Image (tube, grey):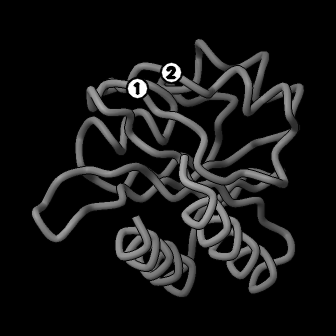
């Protein structure tokens, strides 16, 4: 990934996390083949988690981000530990102490999925209206940057 894009994505994630200090945010990008997610920016997630997720194939029931990229729709998982999309990643999410994940697809002006913007919590949690607006806003900012 181009260094200047990396800096912009890191700044977007940093701003989102500063706005909500109890959350961890990430931006994943769709690869050239539009089939796999690669790490764009996720500095607050553990390295082992980022390494494991980097290159994951998108699909209807692939976590929150893989599903959001595949379906082109926001995916809200309030409880990772019990949600069907996360069953294959349960050991990983528990080791990273992640218990909810809300993912918004990053959509280009040509209506193509570019990646995902996600907000993680280390508690089971549903987003309020403010958080839903926030995730959409940051996904739109990321789309412009990409």
Mark 1 to mark 2: distance in Å? 5 Å
Which residue is most to the left?
A: 110
Q: Residue at x 40, y 64 (%)?
A: 146
* Residue located at (51% from left, 31% from top): 63
Instruction: Name the image quarter holding residue 133.
Output: bottom left
Residue visible at 38% across and 39% down in the picture: 30
Looking at the rendered structure, the secondary structure element under dot 1 is strand
Toward the viewer: 114 or 128? 114
Q: Is residue 95 left or right of residue 33?
A: right
Is residue 105 placed above or below 79 in the rendered structure? below
Residue 18 vertical position relative to residue 122 in the rendered view, above or below: below
Which residue is disc 2 drawn over?
56
Q: Residue at x 48, y 53 (%)?
A: 103
Percent x, y for residue 95? 89, 26
**Label 2 neighbour load within 10 Å: few <14, some 14-19, many 20+:** some
Label 1 vs 2, first from the N-terminus: 1
Dot 2: element:
strand
Asked if residue 134 lies left or right of residue 79, the reply is left
Bin the neighbour count of mark 1 within 10 Å (Cα to Cα): few under 14, some 14-19, many 20 and up: many
Assess whether mark 2 and mark 1 are in contact (beta carbons under 8 angstroms). yes
Which residue, given by chain and number where applicable, does mark 1 sit on? 36
């Amino acid at each position: 990934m181009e260094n200047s894009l990396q800096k912009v994505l890191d700044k977007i994630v940093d701003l989102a996390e500063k706005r909500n200090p109890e959350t961890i945010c990430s931006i994943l990008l769709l690869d050239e083949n539009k089939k796999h997610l690669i790490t764009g920016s996720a500095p607050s997630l553990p390295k082992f988690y980022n390494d494991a997720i980097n290159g994951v194939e998108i699909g209807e029931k692939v976590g929150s981000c893989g599903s959001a990229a595949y379906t082109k729709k926001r995916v809200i998982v309030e409880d990772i530990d019990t949600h069907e999309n996360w069953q294959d990643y349960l050991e990983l999410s528990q080791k990273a102490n992640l218990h909810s994940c809300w993912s918004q697809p990053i959509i280009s002006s040509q209506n193509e999925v570019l990646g995902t913007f996600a907000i993680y919590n280390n508690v089971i949690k549903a987003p309020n209206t403010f958080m839903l607006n926030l995730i959409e806003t940051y996904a739109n900012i990321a789309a412009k940057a990409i």
